[in-house]
Image (cartoon, rainbow, N blue to C red):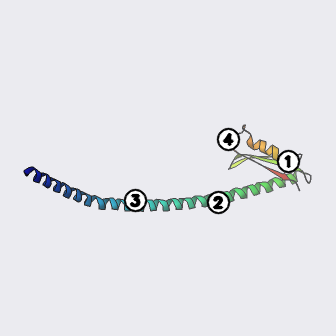
Amino acid sequence: MGTSIFYKILATISTVGIVAVAGLLVPIASQKDNDLEESLANTKRELTQARKEALTEVKAMRRDALSEVKAARAESLKALNKAGAKEGSVWLVMMYGAITGGSMEKLEMKDFDQCEEQGAFFKASKRFSPAGYTGFECLEAK
């Protein structure tokens, strides 16, 4: 009988200890959950803000690039007209170089189809440095 009381007391003390430890751990765990949720919400807000800023920057860069292309096209047309291009002739205008600078060349083509074909060959060429920008435009002299 003495050993059974001992085991009952030991079981009671163990149960009380487990309940006490659980009572301490549950508030700590729930606080960590709240901190985790708050941290995730902050991260989501930061990512949303970073995405908005990146999209704004991309739009600005696209707008700048489009204005540069329009200016280059107008400049090319002026150069073609100044060079005495006959009306209705088609010109392949090629550009190679970095964004900050580069070179531009023009070649007269037989027709618009030939211009598009040769421009695609130029753009796909592996002989140019991959770091450089290549582009072309087919222009019809007016």
| 118 with respect to 6 (left or right) | right
Which residue was labeled with disc 4? 130
Q: Amino acid at mark 2?
A: Lys
Mark toward the start of the polypeptide (2 vs 1)? 2
Mark toward the start of the polypeptide (3 vs 4)? 3
Mark toward the start of the polypeptide (1 vs 3)? 3
> Whole-Å distance between the Cαs marked 3 and 2?
35 Å
> Whole-Å distance between the Cαs marked 1 and 3?
61 Å
Which residue was labeled with disc 2? 59
Q: Amino acid at mark 4?
A: Pro
Q: Quadrant of residue 39?
A: bottom left
Q: Amino acid at mark 1?
A: Asp
Disc sitting over residue 36 in the figure: 3
Mark in front: 2 vs 1: 1
Q: Position of residue 48 (x, y in %)?
A: 53, 61
Q: Amino acid at mark 3?
A: Leu
Dot 2: within a 10 Å radius of its alpha carbon, few (fewer than 14), some, or many (20 or more) residues?
A: few
Q: Residue at x 67, y 41 (%)?
A: 130
Mark in front: 1 vs 3: 3
Mark toward the start of the polypeptide (1 vs 4)? 1
Mark in front: 3 vs 2: 3
Q: Regarding mark 3 in the picture, which secondary structure is present there?
A: helix
Q: Regarding mark 1 in the picture, which secondary structure is present there?
A: helix
> Whole-Å distance between the Cαs marked 1 and 4?
26 Å
Q: Nearer the viewer, residue 31 or 72?
A: 31
Q: Quadrant of residue 122?
A: top right
Q: Nearer the viewer, residue 139 or 35?
A: 35
- The answer to whether the residue labelled 3 contacts the one labelled 4, judged by CB atoms less than 8 Å apart, is no
Which residue was labeled with disc 1? 113
Q: Quadrant of residue 13?
A: bottom left
> Whole-Å distance between the Cαs marked 3 and 4?
45 Å
